[in-house]
Amino acid sequence: MTHSVVRHLVFKDLYLVRWPVIASVVAGLASIAIMPLSPVLAYVGGVSFICVIVILNIVLVMSAVVQEKKDKVLLFILSLPISTTQYTRAKVTANAIAFVGSLLLLTAVAVFVIRVSALPNGILPFLIAVLGYLLTYYCVLLGVGLASDSTGWHTTVITTGNISINFLIPLLLSLPSVVHNRAGATAVWTRDIVTIIAVEIVVGLAALAVAVYVRSRAGDFV
Amino acid sequence: MTEPLIDVVGVEKSYRFFRLSNVAMRLEPGQILGFVGPNGAGKSTTIRILMGMLRAERGTVHVLGHLVPRDQALAKRDIGFVSEDMQLHGSATLAWHMRLVASIYPGWDVKYADVLLRRFNLHAEQTVKALSHGERVKAVLLLALARRPRLLLLDEPTTGLDPVARHEILAELMDVVRDERRGILFSSHNTQDVEQISDQITFIDRGRIIDSSDKEVFLDRWRRLHLDVPPGTAVPALPGAIDTTASGRIAVVTTNSYTPEIDAACVRAGLTVRDVQRMTLEEIFVANVMSNRREADR
Amino acid sequence: MHSDVLISQADRRPMYLQIMEQIRHRIAVGDWPPGRELPSIRALAASTQVSVITVKRAYLELEREGVIVTRQGKGSFVADSAGLSMQLRRDELDEHLTAAANIGRQLGMTADEIADRLHEAVKTRDENER
């Protein structure tokens, strides 16, 4: 019975965040759509694309994880026949499906649009590196949302995450391989870019794993 | 011999300013246990330990035969938990929640759920956000009761409810023990409700169980004696006299071990027993807590 | 659902005594004739909204008084007339004693003095019977 309870909780969480997800996907698609139209719009589209992802990230973690805890809805969910570990698992699964699913969908569409349009394919490694960073940001925020009740910590992560993107982008753009290849017609996956992407994924997963571990060791859940 | 629904031994848990110490509790099938204590005494903490939401530092907790928190998922298959501060998802309707619970529990009784909707005067299509405090508590109770769980753990289920709602809820709770395999533990500081429907009563204060007994025994054991103390006489030492207030020629003795022999002892000491009053559970509760605190502070 | 018994919160007498009184009354007015089965303890507890333990106590006391008879595994039944008339006569005695107590108090007598007069009456009655 307990496995089906986890499944029910995942579906329940996905149902409850359906509007933010749909709105983000639509807004994301719109941002991608305007990118091929002109260099200015490419920039605008790119920036709004990143904003959409960040907003979805924050909304998902805050509403599904933090709010549930604060609002004592957690008490109701934990009254169901699941262990605290299964609760965490269901939360991460649902949240990840919603976020990563949207991110993957939008990434696929962006890659497709870049390939078929006049936009240079050379920009792809840069794009993936940025999205990888957003994924890391998501994992860290989700982890902190799970492991900590402190609004201070949540705000710190959100602020740091948002500000750091503004440093990340020029930093990536200044990498020699990006400078060299971004306007080109082929995507060149140099070692530095690939390393960066790999580090982003590892750090993200590690942060999440630590948070889940910390949460499951904590005997006190409410 | 049927196993108890709840079996707790030696539970300890510390917080910065509060300590739950040596908590033991036992609920047999077919019984209702009233768990009474002032605010902050540790009632909610104890109940959440039973639900595996908090982990005790010491002691063992068995609920429905399962070790908690290790096997809490198994135990919770047959436990209905209601807490006064519990919330549901605000943006969803009560009907949505009912469908969610029904899909998880095979024991969901659709007909009974409908009966409860009517009895509790709730509307399934109403959004949870729009419910008043009383309606929300009734909604959560409905979700717990309609599954017909073997054990109900209720943390202040009637607090903040109007008398009509309380009456309806007590009726449903009493209905549960028509089945002698089921049982209820409910915490409350509404001593009237506890006095009426509990079979067993446990008092808790400042993290310790200060008294636990059969309800009828409590009500039989405790008395207030109103005594006339003529000059030259004094109130003798009486068994179980936990509080004696004497002023001038009148004394009131509160005892927790009343027997008619006490009347005789007073008469022998030259006093007149003007009245021997039974005490309500509320009076017993307050006297018990006060006397325990005096002892502890000494 | 109507209940056979109704507990009053304003009545400060113990709940089990209220239950006993109401059951006796039901029997006395003929609603529950001898041999009739009483509601099960749990059913009465649920319909009255009084704890099971209190109803159990009431049934036990009523059985001790001979008003009802409990058969293991079968339930409780209103006792036949013999047991009943015992109870009715005991009730009659209590009424007389209460009346005597009232009169004694009105005369300003203490409980001991009233009791002494009762002892005298018993002694006299026994001597006359011999």
Image: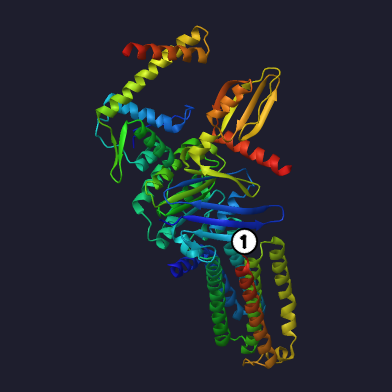
Identify residue type, mark 1: Arg
Res. C79 visible in picture: yes
Image-based side of A25 in relation to A54, left or right: left
Residue B194 pos. (x, y %): 51, 40
Q: Nearer the viewer, residue A59 or B117?
A: B117
Which quadrant holds the C terminus of chain B?
top right
Q: Nearer the viewer, residue A125 or B141?
A: B141
Residue C86 pos. (x, y %): 31, 25
Q: Residue at x 51, y 60 (%)?
A: B62
Res. A12 visible in picture: no
Residue B173 pos. (x, y %): 43, 45
Residue C9 pos. (x, y %): 47, 30
Of helix, strand and loop, which one carries label 1? strand
Q: Is residue B191 above or below residue B269?
A: below
Q: Quadrant of residue B235?
A: top right
Q: Nearer the viewer, residue C50 or B161?
A: C50
Q: Is residue A150 above or below residue C125?
A: below
Q: Quadrant of residue C99?
A: top left
- Circle 1 chain: B
Q: Residue at x 62, y 36 (%)?
A: B286
Q: Is residue C11 above or below residue B14?
A: above
Q: Residue furthest front?
A: C130
* Residue named by callout 1: B58
